[in-house]
Amino acid sequence: MDVRIVNHSKHPLPSYQTIESAGMDLRANTDEDITLNPMERKLIGTGLHIELPVGFEAQIRPRSGLAYKFGITVLNSPGTVDSDYRGELKVLLVNLSEQTVTLKDGERIAQLVVARHEKITWMEADSLTDTERGQGGYGSTGR
Ligand SMILES: O=c1ccn([C@H]2C[C@H](O)[C@@H](COP(=O)(O)OP(=O)(O)OP(=O)(O)O)O2)c(=O)[nH]1
Ligand SMILES: [Mg+2]
């Protein structure tokens, strides 16, 4: 599926790292190094603008390597990109480690997964059907 993209960054278009990757890595597009102190969050531009077809969304998800090695994750994970959004794709990173972390321009900081989504209409009712789970949740089935 072709998706229109405008690349205002200094970097190549995001691409799949392997033939069957679900996500394309997003690169930081910044003039200066990005420094994230412990518990600090920053919104980082990618310089990319996309036009998703109606019925599709894109999710901005963390990279597991950055999370595991440095405690860097996407604060609003998964970030939701709506198909009608024409602004710059941005990545909201947070440093959950106890060390300051520096990221460089062009570094792959998150990944973008494009997915279909349903659009629903509500059918308002007075009650819902019975199920085995019922109202149980939040560990109701034990550990
Ligand atoms: O990680 C993200 C999350 C969102 N967006 C863009 C695309 C999305 O379509 C728009 C709005 O996102 P969202 O609906 O999550 O934010 P909001 O706080 O509800 O803002 P709004 O009132 O603009 O919808 O911001 C990003 O670039 N990166
Ligand atoms: Mg919103």
Image (tube, helix red, strand yellow):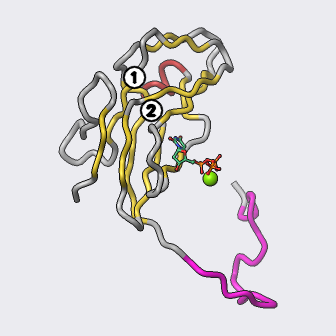
Segment colored magenta: 120-141
Q: The residue tagged with tag 1: helix, strand or loop?
A: loop
**Residue 72 as seen in the image, left or right of residue 141:** left
Residue 138 drawn above or below residue 69: below
Q: Which part of the image, by quadrant, shows the C terminus?
A: bottom right
Residue 57 higher or lower than 34, as above or below = below
Quadrant in which residue 29 is drawn: top left
Q: Does the magenta stretch include residue 91?
A: no
Determine if the C-beta at disc 1 is less than 8 A from ligand 1: no
Closer to the camera in the image, 52 or 140: 52
Instruction: List x then y, in percent, for residue 72.
Output: 54, 24
Q: Which dot, 1 or 2, sits closer to the camera?
A: 1
Sort mark 1 into few (<14), some (14-19) or many (20+) by Cα contacts within 10 Å.
many
> Could you tell me what secondary structure mostly forms the magenta stretch?
loop
The Cα atoms of the two marked residues, 1 and 2, are separated by: 20 Å
Which of 138 and 143 lies nearest the eye of the viewer? Answer: 138
For residue 143, side relative to residue 36 (left or right): right
Label 1, on which residue? 29
Circle 2 sits on which residue? Answer: 64
Name the residue type under label 2: Ser
Task: Look at the picture and state if 115 lies above or below 13.
Answer: below
Q: What element carries label 2?
A: helix
Amino acid type shown at disc 1: Asn
Frontmost residue, 83 versus 33: 83
Identified at 21% across, 39% down, the residue is 18
Q: Which residue is drawn at 79% across and 89% down?
A: 127
Q: Splitting the image into 4 quarters, where does residue 54 fall?
A: bottom left
Which residue is drawn at the image coordinates 63% and 24% (left, top)? 41
Side of 22 where 116 appears, left or right: right
